[in-house]
Image (cartoon, rainbow, N blue to C red):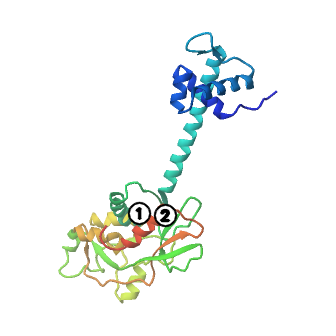
Amino acid sequence: MNHPLPPLRLLTAFAAVARAGSLQAAAAELNVTQPAISQAVRQLEDHIGLPLLDRGRRPARPTEAGEALATAIHEGLGRIAGTIDAQRLARTRHDATVTVACSVGVATYWLMPRLSALYREQPDLLVNVMTVPSGAPALAEGIDLAIRYGHGRWKDGHVQHLFDEEVMPVCAPKLRARYDAVVSLQSAPLLHVRSAEPSWLTWSDYLLATGLSAVRHEARVFTNYVQATQAAVEGHGVMLGWRSITGALTASGALVTAGLPGLAPRDAFFLVARSKRGGHAIERFTRFLLSNPAGKP
């Protein structure tokens, strides 16, 4: 038959006696009078029906039952304290953690350099990054924010404009050096990125918009922008460079413009937050991104 547990104050008082070695020392530890400690121990003994202190000794020492109970109290309160600390730590980490989804190219070339700056300013903030091949990642369970390219008229979250884009053909300096003025699309290989996202600007879109023409070469097609960018850096062809992704590479000289006209797509990059999702970390991360959109990280 289960009996109700004694009050916590009685257990705490007895544990202090066992730990401190005497009634007087326990009273000093808990900042109460010795009679108060003595009364608490007697009430606990009455509650469980067993003597817990051997009062024939000076100072009084725990009986065998008292030793067992003191150990159980110490272990039990220790587990409670540990659980509370763990929950507080988990809460603290949750309040300082944000998960953002974006394309592989945006994550690699645009977001990561900014995260370095973010961690220098706010070292307690933790950003988890989930990637998709391209386009507009969904706000799935566990994702707080999404960096999307597109029209910006989504209804699944709170949409804020991040930055406009500019697309310009780029290539490696060694490829550009083969041509006197501009890179000829009649002879230079074109690097394509295959994407299911209809708003993604393709070479066909670029040629149509600029009125340029190109010879159909053997297709050099990649499934994500990171692969195509690396191929361009290695000199394997000309790619459509999105400023947000290849801007740092052109600034460093790893890529150069092909001397061809640029385009400003009608779509842009947006930051989308789950409508019912809040939190200090999300607000801090959002403010940082909005204040560091398309300039240098």
Q: Nearer the viewer, mark 1 or mark 2?
A: 2
From this viewpoint, which residue is outermost toward the bottom?
211
What secondary structure is found at the residue carrying circle 1? helix
Q: Residues within 10 Å of mark 1 (few under 14, many from 20)?
A: many
| Count of numbered circles on the image | 2
Disc 1 residue type?
Answer: Ala
Tell me the kind of residue under disc 2.
Answer: Ile
Relative height, residue 281 to residue 168 (above, below): above
Front one among 130 and 203:
130
- Residue 238 at x, y = what percent? 31, 73
Q: State the residue at coordinates (62%, 25%).
A: 72
In this view of the protein, can residue 230 be seen by the observer?
A: yes
Whichever of callouts 1 and 2 sits on the residue coming sooner in the sequence is: 1
Local packing at callout 2 (Cα closer than 10 Å; few below 14, some 14-19, many 20+) is: many
The disc label shown at residue 156, or none = none
Please tell me in which quadrant of the rendered image residue 170 appears.
Answer: bottom left
Query: Against 264, is 119 above or below?
Result: above
For label 2, the SS is helix
Expressed as whole percent of the image width and height from the top left, the position of residue 276 reads 60, 67
The N terminus, quarter of image? top right
7 left or right, relative to 269: right
The residue that disc 2 covers is 282
Quadrant hosting residue 232: bottom left
Q: Nearer the viewer, residue 257 or 106?
A: 106
- Residue matched to label 1: 107
Give the residue at the far top of this rendering. 56
